[in-house]
Amino acid sequence: QVQLVESGGGLVQAGGFLRLSCAASGSIISINDMGWYRQAPGKQRELVAAITSGGSTNYADSVRGRFTISRDNARRMVYLQMNSLKPEDTAVYYCSANLRVRFYEPPRDYWGLGTQVTVSA
């Protein structure tokens, strides 16, 4: 059973910081791109940041310069360091990873269940 499990969410004041972690577990052959998405109430899920297996990163304009994505391939982990948090960053944050779990099947995207981040004004 392949799982992505997020941790590190919580309540923080504006200007504060949080670090999200996501662990991939199970029978995984390879991990390609990993990323963080978020969904605020009444809004569509949006990409926050992504990182390739080689370490190239991509950020949403709204978080560039404040958030940093990183990964530890040996530990099958992806992280999101969030600094200078704003109330508009409040959302459920989801981890995503493109995984190959069987040699005879192409890789596909897997998702975690999400972790709540709330930023108070």
Image: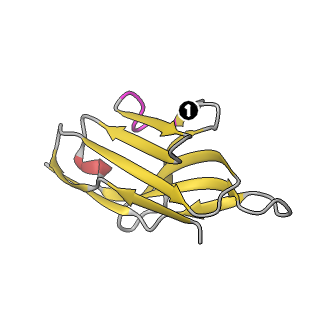
Is residue 10 in the magenta section? no
Q: Residue at x 70, y 54 (%)?
A: 29
Answer above or below: position of 5 versus 32: below
> How many numbered badges does the structure rendering display?
1
Residue at 53% from the left image edge and 48% from the top image edge: 76
Q: Which residue is mark 1?
A: 57
As drawn, is 99 to the left or to the right of 74?
Answer: right
- Residue at 64 percent of width and 63 percent of height: 27
In depth, the one of 66 and 76 nearer the eye is 76
Give the image quarter of residue 68: top left
Q: Is residue 96 left or right of residue 118?
A: right
Residue 21 versus residue 26: which sits nearer the camera? 26
Colour theme: secondary structure
Q: Residues within 10 Å of mark 1 (few under 14, many from 20)?
A: some
Q: Quadrant of residue 106?
A: bottom right
Residue that sits furthest to the bottom in the current view: 1
Q: Look at the picture and state if 25 lies above or below 83.
A: below
Residue range highlighted in magenta: 59-65
- Against 61, is 94 above or below? below
Quadrant position of the N terminus in the picture: bottom right
Whole-percent x, y for residue 53 in the image = 64, 37
> Quadrant of the rendered structure where residue 108 is?
bottom right
User: Which secondary structure type mostly characterizes the magenta part of the structure?
Assistant: loop
Query: For the residue labelled by badge 1, is the local secondary structure a helix, a strand or a loop?
Result: strand
Residue that lies at the very extreme toward the right in this rendered image? 104
> Residue 28 appears at what percent x and percent y?
65, 58
Under mark 1, the amino acid is: Thr
